[in-house]
Image: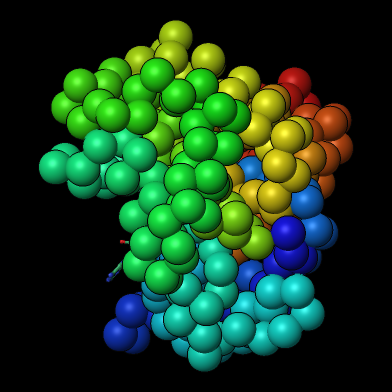
Amino acid sequence: MASVELRNVRKAYGSLEVIHGVSLSIEDGQFIALVGPSGCGKSTLLRMIAGLEEITAGDVVIDHAVVNDLTPRERNIAMVFQSYALYPHMTVAENMGFNLRLSGAPKPVIAERVNEAARMLDLMPLLDRKPAQLSGGQRQRVAMGRAIVRNPAVFLFDEPLSNLDAKLRVQMRSEIKTLHQKVGTTSIYVTHDQIEAMTLADRIVVLNQGRMEQEGTPMELYKKPANLFVAAFIGSPA
Ligand code: ADP
Ligand code: MG
């Protein structure tokens, strides 16, 4: 687990700045929801934290160290996307162990970690299946399993449930909550679904057009929205 800090982070694509100086501090083990309308910069911000996108200015700090120049692998961050990006020719077990295999972990260690994650996510009976033989929810669990197996310091989720139907979304939401209670890994969870944010997060960060509008506990945002934008987004009566 690790703390994450953004210090006046900016991102420009060419001459167009899309993240205008965001500062944020996330404590070890916290679950943060990052919400905001489509195009406001949520994915860009996550990708900068992950090291998948160069930052134009500012610092990304993990466990009190500036990591701007570290590769994604060196940052020890796992990212879960909406498109599950599982390898179709590999079994569930092989998919889950893939990153560990790349990093040269011995086979028995990989097997042990895969089994541990599979038990946590109820994937034990599915370990020998191929992704095509799984439901959408099961695939999403495998994608999370693959992330957990690496024992990352930070989890980044980019709208992981947006491809699932409403019923499955509710079920997966509670599974993610349970998972966080079990492993306690610092998590940043991007969603445009305010109910998801309200139920999952210790704190919510509201982003609008590349700027942070407000951050606080779900209750704080609901009771004291800083402006009409936050009020409308959170659905508070103000
Ligand atoms: P969100 O995830 O909140 O929907 P994004 O982070 O994907 O938003 O995008 C934020 C802004 O940056 C958008 O205006 C988008 O068009 C722009 N953008 C994202 N990626 C690129 C890119 N590779 N090149 C140019 N503009 C981009
Ligand atoms: Mg996005």
Q: Nearer the viewer, residue 211 or 200?
A: 200
Spot the residue most to the left: 89
Residue at screen point 65% across, 61% down: 153
Find residue 89 and report its image quarter: top left
Report x, y in % for residue 211: 59, 63
- On the question of residue 6 being in view, the answer is yes
Measured along the vertical axis of the image, is residue 173 above or below residue 43? above
Front-most of residues 235 and 30? 30
Residue closer to the observer: 82 or 14:
82
Task: Please state the total of marks drawn on the protein image.
Answer: 0
User: For the point 44% across and 9% down, which residue is it?
Assistant: 167
Going 42% across and 56% down the picture, which residue do you hit?
Answer: 107
- Which quarter shows the C terminus? top right
Q: Position of residue 72 (x, y in %)?
A: 46, 73
Residue at image location 64% in from the left, 44% down from the top? 33
**Left or right: 90, with 119 as reference point:** left
Quarter of image, res 90: top left
Residue 205 in view (yes/no): no
Q: Is residue 88 left or right of residue 31?
A: left
The N terminus sits in image quarter: bottom right
In the rendered image, residue 127, in percent from the top left (x then y), is placed at: 35, 29
Farthest front residue in view? 108
